[in-house]
């Protein structure tokens, strides 16, 4: 790595003939680097940029846009979107940047990916941070539906109406005859649309719009659009509760790859129909033998019940709840998040060297 303290360096590394974008910030000689693995799947981690800056005075910090989203290449090949693809990509990242020793922080889907990577028995992993993550897709869906059941009945009805008629054809994983290569999406490419999205959010999530969506959902061609409108009301409760919704989150949303999300997960947070639908590593959590910190928000869609399963399954792990956050704790309570994270990483670095071997 060539980043110096406080200075960002960006580039691409090669993976299976594609290009994956990365950014480093901080002095690589100042300590064991922290690698941030974003959520999604298929949603880039631009919202991590402020977090990187706050952490870079103590250690180098690395983030990357997983293949298919953000600035990275976007091959139109559904057969690529498998867990192993992203595990292999992370291996390629470490090789390309010479990351012999690392701390890992995985948020949401990124935590799932980090667990899968740890279970492959790599060397040089000093610690693991699971930020608003999970160990079982089915239990996640159960908890998400429990949360949505507390929403107004007409919003829940919109969601159920779509799900009852969904045939899953959009999640085809067959490779096309010719793979179309699409370039990555730069933040400036979506800047105007992101501002418009941010401006429209209060209207989209208003009770009037939600009522209109409820009526419109009876019309079959409108069910998908109304489902997404209803989903925004859920996300404003359990993804990010900030009144002044951050612009970078809108940019990340617009730089997403819906194909990746639906092939791997499904149409929504509470409707998993993709290749991760039966994902469950709870029986293997005891194999995680690095210091582990679990973080989540009080109003998180990654509910306390899910975090307890992680806590009970990973030996010696610890769990901290951020009381004023939903799913995006590092955006909603950045000062507290950095404080807890830095304390944990410093403690690990001060102790005897530990790695997954």
Image: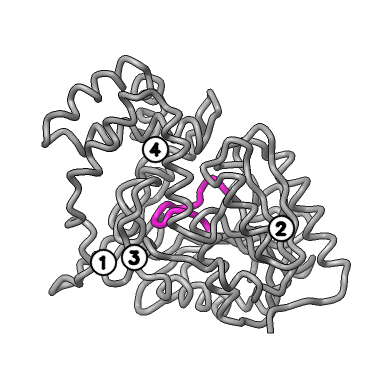
Residue at figure coordinates x 62%, y 81% from the top left: 122
Q: Which mark is residue 78?
A: 1
Q: Are marks 4 and 1 in contact (CB under 8 Å)?
A: no
Q: Disc 1 versus disc 3: distance between alpha carbons?
A: 11 Å
- Choose mark 1 or mark 2, whichever is in front: 2
Classified by dominant secondary structure, the portion drawn in magenta counts as loop
SS class of the residue under badge 4? helix
Name the residue that disc number 3 marks: 275
Q: Nearer the viewer, residue 302 or 57?
A: 302
Dot placed on the residue nearer the N-terminal end, 4 or 1: 1
Neighbour class for label 4 at 10 Å: few (<14), some, many (≥20)? some
Q: Which numbered disc, 1 or 3, marks the residue that appears first in the sequence?
A: 1
Q: How much space separates mark 4 and mark 3, taking CA atoms?
A: 32 Å
Q: Is residue 44 magenta?
A: yes
Secondary structure, mark 1, is helix
> Mark 1 or mark 2, which has the lower sequence index?
1
Q: Is residue 259 above or below residue 275?
A: above
Q: Are marks 1 and 2 in contact (CB under 8 Å)?
A: no
Span colored in magenta: 38-48
Residue under the image location 49 percent in, 31 percent down: 237
């Amino acid at each position: 790595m060539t980043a110096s303290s406080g200075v960002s360096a960006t580039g691409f590394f090669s993976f299976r003939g594609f290009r994956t974008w990365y950014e480093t910030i901080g002095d690589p000689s100042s300590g064991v680097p922290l690698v941030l693995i974003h959520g999604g799947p298929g949603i880039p981690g631009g919202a991590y940029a402020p977090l990187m800056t706050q952490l870079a005075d103590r250690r180098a910090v690395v983030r990357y846009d997983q293949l298919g989203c953000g600035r990275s290449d976007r091959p139109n090949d559904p057969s690529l979107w498998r867990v192993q693809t992203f595990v292999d990509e992370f291996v390629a990242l470490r090789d390309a940047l010479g990351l012999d020793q690392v701390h890992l922080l995985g948020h949401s889907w990124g935590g799932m990916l980090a667990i899968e990577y740890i279970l492959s028995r790599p060397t040089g992993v000093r610690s693991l941070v699971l930020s608003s993550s999970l160990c079982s897709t089915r239990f996640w869906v159960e908890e998400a539906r429990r949360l949505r059941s507390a929403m107004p009945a007409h919003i829940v009805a919109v969601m159920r109406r779509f799900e009852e008629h969904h045939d899953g054809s959009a999640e085809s994983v067959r490779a096309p005859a010719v793979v179309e290569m699409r370039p990555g999406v730069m933040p400036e490419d979506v800047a105007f649309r992101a501002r418009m999205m941010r401006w429209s959010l209060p209207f989209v999530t208003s009770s009037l719009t939600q009522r209109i969506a409820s009526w419109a959902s009876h019309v079959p061609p409108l069910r998908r659009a109304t489902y997404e409108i209803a989903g925004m009301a859920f996300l404003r409760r359990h993804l990010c509760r900030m009144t002044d919704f951050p612009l970078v989150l809108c940019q990340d949303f617009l730089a997403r790859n819906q194909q990746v999300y639906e092939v791997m997960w499904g149409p929504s947070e509470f409707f998993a129909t993709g290749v991760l639908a039966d994902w469950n590593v709870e029986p293997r959590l005891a194999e995680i033998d690095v210091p582990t910190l679990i973080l989540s928000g009080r109003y998180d869609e990654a509910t306390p019940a899910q975090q307890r399963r992680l806590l009970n399954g990973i030996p010696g792990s610890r769990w901290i709840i951020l009381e004023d956050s939903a799913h995006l704790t590092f955006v909603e309570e950045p000062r507290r998040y950095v404080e807890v994270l830095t304390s944990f990483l410093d403690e690990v670095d001060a102790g005897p060297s530990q790695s997954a071997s």
